[in-house]
Amino acid sequence: MALNPLFFRKTIIAGTGLFLCIFLIVHLSANCILLLPEETARGLYNSYSTTLRESPLIKLVAYALYASILLHVVYALLVTLQNRKANPQKYVLNRFQENSTWTSQNMGLIGTMILLFIVVHLANFWARIKLGMGEAVRLDAAGNMDVYEVTSSLFHNIYYVIFYTVLVIPLALHLHHGLKSAFKTLGFYHKKGLRIIAKVALIYAIIMGAGFGIIPFIVYFK
Amino acid sequence: MKVTFKIWRQEGPKDKGAIRDYEVEGLTEDMSFLEALDHLNELLVLNNEKVIAYEYDCREGICGQCGVFINGRAHGPHDNMTTCQLHMRSFKEGDTIVVEPWRAASFPVIKDLVVDRSAFDRIIEQGAYISAKTGAAPEANAIPIPKEMSDRAMDAAACIGCGACVATCKNSSAALFTSAKINHLNGLPQGYAEQHKRVSEMTYQMEIEGFGSCTFTGACEVECPEGISIINIAEMNARLTKSRIFG
């Protein structure tokens, strides 16, 4: 029997979502360099980003990352469209907040906000550093691209600081529901295990939200 | 007791339908919700109006017929309850009570509050049984089954097919219903032989019927009169994967 789209699409969303969750851990860990005093942070951050750009293994992971984001978005869109078709007529009165969380009911909306963030985020960094668009990135004393400077100048613009900080809220909400549900979608049904996963998902979402949210502020006041 | 009912009236499947208001007096707190509807229908008969069509059978919470959406919740304001077990004491004097049929593309409205739930029957036809001649009831201890296993099967078997899970799901997913029917049999030795065929064909039928996919909002397990756990859906997902590998 052919693959059942009801399950296949969700499996792709869950699988890519979990991969993106792992990526975020690495991303936040690396960004913690930005919390260090400027003289230490600049050299470390720039040499780290040079390593990322030049390692062939990281290149492979980067392609997996692009593919994951695209698949996650495309399949989420397909699932959402299918689900809307399955439920075309809404209730006159629906008190869904009494039986489920707002987040779980609005993952599509929250995901769209994150997608908007990713587009801006890629335009700020990826397009400038990897694609060479916009103002050329200078080299630091060690001859590495001064990515620290790109970050620092961006986060000295209060509007960007607010944008980056506010958008960690949908990120944290999305991660909380997503991480919790991904395991169930992939067929993990151990009762106690699921309770632990729910707690881990909450802690993970708080750490990611607080971590990514605080860095722009720290850089702003440095 | 006096309340205002706002009830969905729809002449037939092709009719557009709309909410109509009915002010009803002479109710008591001890009346069940269905008795209040009966009372309203009697008043409509006396007024020479068409009565409101709604489904019921046992009125004791075990048949799953009486599914309606009351004040924004499947089966009314309480968790894990059927409509027939809801009483007017759950409402206050002067309350407005909105009553709507289940909403899902796979549950088309037949008339007023009655929907066609035969999509569930067609899912069941795909394998919620064992295809062996069982004859007379066998000796109860002929197949020893550990207590934990039988408890889990019985918890899943408690599903009465009322459709609240689909009705409350923002995706109109039938995952809780289908998973309960699958896990009930797949968890027992009697259902073991046909486990892979069962899970693959029943989930396939679920897709054909136009139900959405589960996104784990968890609303279904709150509204399910039998309190069937959403973990059943995760188990069904695992069984489906297993059927792909071994089936």
Image (tube, coloured by chain):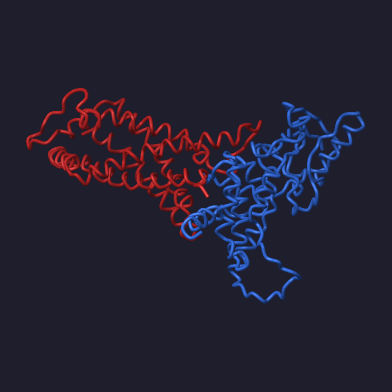
Please provide percent x and percent y for residue A214: 30, 38
Which quarter of the rendering shows the N terminus of chain B? top right
Chain letter, colour blue: B
Residue at 48% over, 52% down: A184
A218 with respect to A97 (left or right): left
Q: Quadrant of residue B141?
A: bottom right
Residue at 63% over, 46% down: B165
- Number of numbered discs on residues: 0
Picture colour for chain A: red
Q: Quadrant of residue A150?
A: top left
Q: Determine whether B231 is above or below A167 in the image.
A: below
Name the foreground residue: A199 vs A114.
A114
Name the foreground residue: A154 vs B91.
A154
Please provide percent x and percent y for residue A92: 66, 31
Name the foreground residue: A210 vs A56.
A56
A116 with respect to B43 (left or right): left
Q: Quadrant of residue B169?
A: top right
Furthest-top residue in this view:
A134
Please provide percent x and percent y for residue B69: 69, 39
Please provide percent x and percent y for residue A36: 19, 42
A103 with respect to A133 (left or right): right
Furthest-front residue in this view:
A1
